[in-house]
Image (cartoon, grey):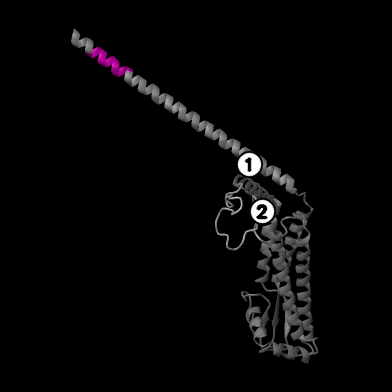
Amino acid sequence: MASKCPNCGRVLKWYDFKAECKDCGVSIPNFNWEARLEEDAERAAVKSASFNRTMGMFKYSVWGTKLRIARIILSFIPIIGYIVPWYAFKSEGESLGIDVIGLFTDGKSLIDFFKSFFGNMNLYFENMAFENYSGPVTYISLGVLFMVLCLLFAVIAFFMILIRNKNPKSKTMVIFDCLSIASSVVSIIMFTLAVKGAATYTAFSLGEMPFYSMTGSLGWGYFVALGLLTVALVANILVMRAPAKTHDELEEERLKKKAEKEEKEKLEEIRKEEERIEKERKAAEEQSKIVEEARAKLEADKNKRKD
């Protein structure tokens, strides 16, 4: 759309470089600058109010109450549940512990499993096809997949606290917590089925890891993980059911605090000004006293010389 002179409406050409309009002579950049300045100030005030409302709701949703502070802490803590052992597979060949970094694992850990899987996925899928997708390789891989989904849903639930801040009573976090817990249960079921499937496939290869007469047991770490996930779920349910303040209530509180702060600052300025005036008055009195004493001394000396 072509630019026009704000005063006379003349269409400006690409070669009109001068600041003044050729027809009416008005300065285009400075035309009606006071009105435009007021409009800019009004737009800035609207944006500032919108920003304050958004930040107020964000702060309230995340850490506005003791329950919400506890919720965000309890929603982060379940990450601990993925470094403890969920399951342990042992055999006459290799052994595999289902914990992420292998802190509690004697043999291979999930890190080794991921390296093996992503290093040679074709071998895994060939082994799954060989056992007709119903053997230990399939079930262990599915168990790890659901464990990863469990972690993913828990992470999403945590970040939803931040993303869904405009709706402090949102059910989204509860839904993802439930999905996380359900995924953890399915993961353990898959690991259990893998142990049962090992009775049929007494010897199999999990990538490059050979297993012979594999046995498995549920680890104590899973109950820790499940407990932490449940606590996070309960915290989100309590927050969802607790009374929540509206945007208007939060804005009213913000303005009230702002007014109290301004009043306090005003009183402090008045106090400082009064102290300054009092200090000047005392200094003036002290100076006057010194002058009077000096005059009295001069007068006494003068009288003394006369005598």
Q: Residue 149: x percent and y percent? A: 73, 73
Q: Name the foreground residue: 283 vs 138.
A: 283
The reply to whether callout 2 and callout 1 are in contact (CB within 8 Å) is no
> Residue 300 occupies which quadrant of the picture?
top left
Q: Is residue 114 above or below residue 299?
A: below
> Residue 159 occupies which quadrant of the picture?
bottom right
Q: Looking at this rendering, what residue extends furthest in the top direction?
A: 307
Residue corresponding to mark 2: 9
Look at 78% across and 59% down and name the residue there. Answer: 171
Q: Is residue 29 above or below residue 93?
A: above
From the viewer's perspective, is the residue at label 2 or at label 1 nearer? 2
Q: Quadrant of the N terminus?
A: bottom right
Q: Residue 222: x percent and y percent? A: 72, 71
Residue corresponding to mark 1: 258
In this rendering, would 238 be left or right of 41? right
- Bounds of the magenta span? 292-301
Callout 1 amino acid: Lys
Q: Is residue 210 above or below residue 223?
A: below
Q: Is residue 293 magenta?
A: yes
Task: Classify mark 1: residues with Cα within 10 Å, few (<14), some (14-19) or many (20+).
Answer: few
Q: Quadrant of the C terminus?
A: top left
Element carrying mark 2: loop
